[in-house]
Image (spheres, rainbow, N blue to C red):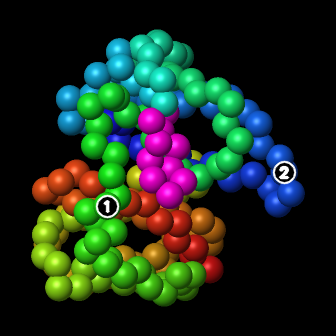
């Protein structure tokens, strides 16, 4: 997969009917990503599947892929046909994220289920601005210095590669 998530929103009352082209650099490709079998996956209640095709070369040493006919917005990711796109394993762990919205810290609790997780925070442009990986049952992320706005929290179970994304608001 491409180690990025794109959160795309529209204004209130806007009807969405669009084509989406996403780009990335080769250094963002992880887990044996095969760009000849890539597609854009859309997260609604789960990550969906889409017709795969070969990514094309873009400007400034990037690669690009396109998805057409998008009528709703939420997180998007670029994956290949071998990607495990499940939130089931993490959802069952009952990870709690609070408070949301926050002014300073968000707390993430994995409860009684132990494992190693990768916690990443992305800004509205899709740039990763924070990352930590550990097996602590409680983690706090200091967002006090972040600009007010929306952020995407991406949590990856390091054992199963299952991923969940949540929107976090910094006030």
- Which residue is label 2 attached to? 14
Q: Position of residue 137 (x, y in %)?
A: 19, 82
- Between 4 and 115, the one lying in front of the other is 115
- Between 119 and 125, the one lying in front of the other is 119
Give the class, few, some or many, for how many residues have Cα within 10 Å of label 2's Cα (few <14, many ≥20).
Answer: few
Q: Residue at x 80, y 56 (%)?
A: 11
Residue 42 falls inside the magenta stretch? yes
Give the class, few, some or many, for how many residues have Cα within 10 Å of label 1's Cα (few <14, many ≥20).
Answer: few
- Asked if residue 119 lies left or right of residue 142, the reply is left
Q: Residue at x 53, y 16 (%)?
A: 59
Q: Which residues are magenta?
A: 40-49
Q: Earlier in the sequence, mark 1 or mark 2?
A: 2
- Between 22 and 95, the one lying in front of the other is 95
The N terminus sits in image quarter: top left
Q: Position of residue 79 (x, y in %)?
A: 37, 34
Judge whether 45 appears above or below 108 on screen.
above
What label sits on residue 88 in the rendered view?
1
């Amino acid at each position: 997969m491409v180690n990025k998530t794109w959160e795309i929103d529209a204004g209130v009352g806007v009807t969405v009917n669009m084509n989406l082209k996403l780009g990335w650099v080769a250094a963002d490709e992880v887990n044996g990503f095969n760009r000849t079998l890539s597609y854009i996956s859309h997260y609604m209640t789960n990550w969906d599947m889409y017709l795969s095709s070969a990514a094309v070369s873009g400007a400034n040493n990037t690669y690009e892929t396109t998805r057409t006919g998008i009528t709703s917005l939420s997180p998007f990711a670029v994956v290949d046909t071998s990607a495990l796109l499940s939130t089931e394993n993490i959802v069952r762990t009952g990870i709690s994220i609070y408070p949301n919205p926050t002014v300073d810290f968000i707390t993430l609790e994995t409860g009684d289920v132990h494992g190693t997780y990768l916690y990443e925070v992305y800004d509205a442009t899709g740039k990763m601005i924070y990352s930590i990986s550990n097996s602590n049952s409680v983690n706090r992320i200091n967002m006090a210095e972040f600009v007010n706005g929306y952020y995407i929290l991406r949590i990856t179970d390091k054992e199963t590669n299952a991923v969940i994304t949540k929107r976090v608001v910094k006030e």
